[in-house]
Image (tube, helix red, strand yellow):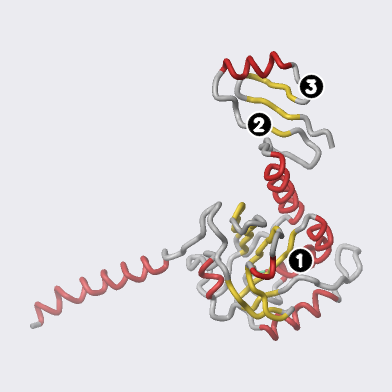
Amino acid sequence: MKKYICIMLPLITIFSMYVFAQSKKDVSIPSLNEAAPAFTAISTQGEVKYPNDFYNKWVIIFSHPADFTPVCTTEIWELAHHQDEFANLNTKLIVISTDGLNSHLEWIKSIESLEYKGMKPTKIKFPLISDVNMSISKMYGMQHPYENSTQNVRGIFIISPKGYIQYIAFYPSYVGRNINEIIRVLTALQESYVNDVLTPVNWQKGDDYLLLPPKSIEMSEKMKEKNDPNFYNYNWYMWFKKNNK
Ligand code: BEZ
């Protein structure tokens, strides 16, 4: 019997450690171009239903680790100061964490009265979802157990008006996001969506676009023969389209 226990105990321990490690790895992050998971949730602005409440809008979902934390506070404050710019880009914002609704409501009050970077307080017009049971957080892969087992990581999901995820990014707790970069990516996505173009490295609004490469050198030469002033190239596969706006 003693011999049996001596053999089995280490095996059971190793197996339990393996199962624990596997369960930690069990993060399911949606793919780019996958339909964004639907949800209904309570928020600081009442019930939020995705996608039903967001018809024909771009949507950005931001997850954050916790209310009443300094980095998150600067991020939500900055979002609030850009919320009209997002609205002008036909974009609705949704913020989500695993904190309770009362915590969100109290935190919002504190952010709305925060005078920071020499700028006056502003009212937050977007909803903060309370995902206490982590159901939405898990669907979107916002829970990264090696980073934190109960709080969300900083996540960004940009979703097209047709409901497909176009951009995903995750940041660790100790690095705040760059809202200007998110606006740049959103603008690039919107312009490439409408004009069927690509955007080159470090593209900024107003810069020229790239085109999908011609299928052959012969096709590139035919494009060149057209002498269209709206297009120019560096080699046969790198064609630019002028941004005339
Ligand atoms: C913050 O937002 O400051 C923060 C959040 C989670 C852990 C550490 C810092």
Distance from mark 1 CB to nearest ligand 1 atom below 8 Å: yes
Q: x%, y% of residue 179?
A: 75, 56
Give the image quarter of residue 86. bottom right
Asked whether, in this view, residue 68 is left or right of residue 144, the answer is: right
Residue bearing mark 2: 211
Label 3 packing within 10 angstroms: few (<14), some (14-19), many (20+): few
Residue bearing mark 1: 74
Query: Element under label 2?
Result: loop
- For ligand 1, give the image quadrant: bottom right
Amino acid carrying label 2: it is: Leu
Give the image quarter of residue 236. top right
> Mark 3 or mark 1: which comes first in sequence?
1
Asked whether, in this view, residue 233 is left or right of residue 89, the answer is: left
> Mark 2 or mark 1: which comes first in sequence?
1
Label 1 packing within 10 angstroms: few (<14), some (14-19), many (20+): some
> Mark 3 or mark 2: which comes first in sequence?
2
- Report the residue at 76% width, 20% height from top: 228
Name the one closer to the observer, 66 or 137.
137
234 versus 211 height, above or below: above
- Report the residue at 81% width, 38% height from top: 206
Residue bearing mark 3: 229
In front: label 3 or label 1 = 3
Q: x%, y% of residue 15?
A: 26, 70
Question: If the image is split into quadrants, where does the N terminus sit?
Answer: bottom left
Query: Element under label 1?
Result: helix
Q: Do the residues labelled 3 and 2 touch (CB within 8 Å)?
A: no
Distance from mark 3 CB to nearest ligand 1 atom below 8 Å: no
- Report the residue at 70% width, 86% height from top: 102
Query: Element under label 3?
Result: loop
Amino acid carrying label 3: it is: Pro
Amino acid carrying label 1: it is: Thr
- Report the residue at 68% width, 79% height from top: 47
